[in-house]
Image (tube, helix red, strand yellow):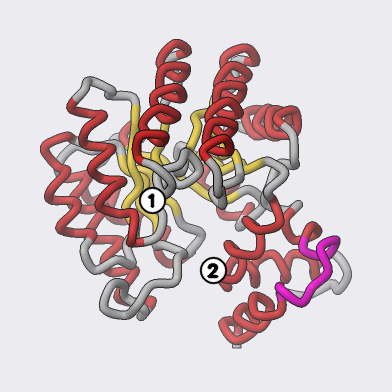
Amino acid sequence: MIRAFDRAVAATLPLVPRPFVRHFADRYMAGETLEDAVATVRRLNGRGVMATIDVLGEFIRLPEEAEATATAYERVLDAIAAERLDATVSVKLSALGIELDPVVAEGTLSRVLACAERHGIFVRIDMEHSGLTDRTLSVYRGLRGAGHDRVGIVLQAYLRRTMDDVESLVDLTPNVRVVKGIYVEPEEVAYRDPAAINGNFIRIVDRLVAHGSYVAIATHDRALINEMLALLDRRIVPRESYEFQMLLGVAEDIRHRLVAAGHRMRVYVPFGDAWYAYSVRRLRENPSIAGYVARDVMRSFVPGVR
């Protein structure tokens, strides 16, 4: 019943007026400006929560937009340093132009990394649709080979190839965010059964921690979080060797519980004026998030909604 509700909410989003989509979006994005993002991160830090900031806008069509994205990230990095925030940044290679021109993407990413390294700030390269997986992993390996050690990668548990990707990266002892994955992929590329995805998620994390990687466990799935806690305990993984990650405004009760128990927690803080396309895509491609948000909205009007 819950999954049917989630899918129904996600399916109706394109028909919903922009102000109502903005109501959804406001619950899990900082706002449109850098100042909004800084204020949000400051509040999170005050509650013992770290952040990773993302500049919205992967839907670019011109090299000039990729350059503008790089400039926006430089401003973010400067602000993190100036405000002494406990935050990193996440970047999408598509937003930096990799689907337009690899040369453009190389230049824009180099700008972001140079600024981050001046400030000593970690950069995470997000994983996107499967058509970019090989290129993203190649970029990451190239950066590590060039001595850029304060850079991490993301692996998606729903992709059938991911355990092979883990094996191909273990020599780097990578810093990895493990996610389920939200992009719509064909069945031959990605698992669709939730149990299969969760099983792969557990195997991926287990393999990474066994090889000494720092792992960012990014999920709101309560059952999976409990499995992760059991795995970390079984492997006797030090608290400084992993963290949990969640979206802004989602499953805050779980976040509070993990922080109170002494686990490192980082919240994904997106901002920018490209909020509409981002919101519709994320909510449609991950109906559970649409359901989370819709139920949260309903709770404010109808007592007892769960």
Residues in magenta, as a range: 13-21
Three-letter code, disc 2: Asn
Q: Is residue 95 visible?
A: yes
Is 5 situated above or below 153?
below
Task: Name the N-terminal-most of marks 1 and 2.
Answer: 1
Is 117 situated above or below 171?
above
Residue 96, image x and y in percent?
Answer: 47, 38
Given residues 174 and 90, the one toward you in this image is 90
Q: Nearer the viewer, mark 1 or mark 2?
A: 1
Residue 33, image x and y in percent?
Answer: 74, 34
Q: Which mark is residue 167?
A: none
- For numbered disc 2, what is the local secondary structure? loop
Q: Would you say the magenta stretch is mainly helix, strand or loop? A: helix
Question: Which quarter of the rendered picture does the N terminus lie within?
Answer: bottom right
Residue 237, image x and y in percent?
Answer: 26, 40
Q: Residue at the location (75% across, 61% down)? A: 24
Q: Residue at the location (63% across, 52% down)? A: 252
In this rendering, position of residue 75 left or right of residue 298: left
Q: Are marks 1 and 2 in contact (CB under 8 Å)?
A: no
Residue 65, image x and y in percent?
Answer: 58, 38
Q: Which residue is mark 2?
A: 286
Q: Which residue is mark 1?
A: 127
Q: Residue at the location (28% across, 23% down)? A: 148
